[in-house]
Amino acid sequence: MKKMMNTRTFLFLVAIIGIAAIVGCSASGSGGAATTPPAATLAAVPLLTADNYEVLATTTVTSSLVPASVITGDVGVRNVSTSLVNLGIVIGVPADHWTSTQVAGKLFSTDLGVAENVALAAANADMVAAYTNAAARLKPTKTDLNSGVMGNIGTLTIPPGLYKFTTAVVIPVAGVTLSGSATDIWIFQVNGALTTSALSNVTLTGGALAANIFWQVGGATTLGATSVFNGIVLSSGAVTVSDGATVHGKLLGETAVTMTHAIVKP
């Protein structure tokens, strides 16, 4: 009787172990190998109709006359045409936009007509919404990157992700590198000003695209003379592009955008 009971117990234990093994394989994936779910993809900041402009401002867009700036794309200001300063604007054909020798595109202001006024109001609202969207992103990849030198991201190579800064951000002459693919996204949440030094570079490697880089700036944005900058600036303060600087991306400022002998292009 005792021998029979031991045999039954043994068979019962074997059955339980077998069931556990089957469940374990099903939970871990094919062949029983453990699988890790892929990391969530960071979504781009939706620009909506603000994406129609290379430079967009609420109060003024100002350029230097000599040497002139070179802007590839449309320029808009939610104000009257006199707020497009030193751009030498002339009426376009048809008469629903302005043109300028400094702009390979169209210029728009609210005094062109009702349709343009409505379009600029929508674009400005979309610009503010994009800023809010970027600022509201949670679960940063890193907070205060390079916290040893608070806000200074010089010499770093930064992979895709969401980066939150509780201070202003400085890019020194040593520059910074963003390394990733053509589908990767970077969002920088800056609680203060963004300043790049003269001669500095924001360098892209691995196929990274300026159109996928968003700089949400809670203060003024100042890009240094002869610097090279990549990305879309969403600035709550004034945007200043110093003499000879090149911007690959967009300048979307909730106040004014001022350029001196700048190159701004997608």
Image (spheres, rainbow, N blue to C red):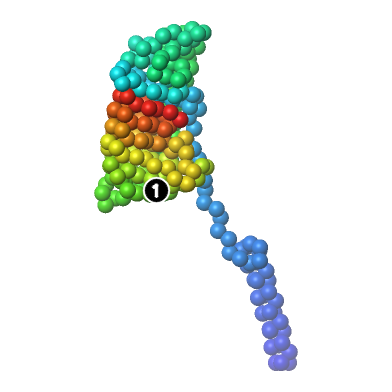
**Dot 1: element:** strand
Q: Nearer the viewer, residue 32 or 51?
A: 51
Residue positioned most to the left: 149
Q: Quadrant of the C terminus?
A: top left
Residue 166 seen in this snapshot: no
Disc 1 designates what residue?
158
To which quarter of the image does residue 17 belong? bottom right
At horizontal 35% and vertical 22% (from top left) the residue drawn is: 69
Please tell me how many numbered marks the rendered image carries.
Answer: 1
Q: Nearer the viewer, residue 187 or 249?
A: 249
Residue 144: x %, y % from top left: 32, 47
Q: Nearer the viewer, residue 26 or 89?
A: 89
At horizontal 63% and vertical 67% (from top left) the residue drawn is: 32
Q: Amino acid at mark 1?
A: Ile
To which quarter of the image does residue 110 belong? top left
Q: Give the vertical position of 123 relative to 97 (above or below).
A: below
Q: Is residue 33 left or right of residue 2?
A: left
Residue 79: x %, y % from top left: 37, 14
Residue 73 seen in this snapshot: yes
Q: Counting other residues with Cα less than 10 Å from the Cα at mark 1, is it few (<14), some (14-19), or many (20 or more)? A: some
Residue 75: x %, y % from top left: 42, 20
Residue 212: x %, y % from top left: 47, 38
At horizontal 26% and vertical 52% (from top left) the residue drawn is: 148
At horizontal 52% and vertical 42% (from top left) the residue drawn is: 183
Q: Quadrant of the N terminus?
A: bottom right
To which quarter of the image does residue 12 belong? bottom right
Residue positioned most to the front: 67
Q: Is residue 32 left or right of residue 258?
A: right
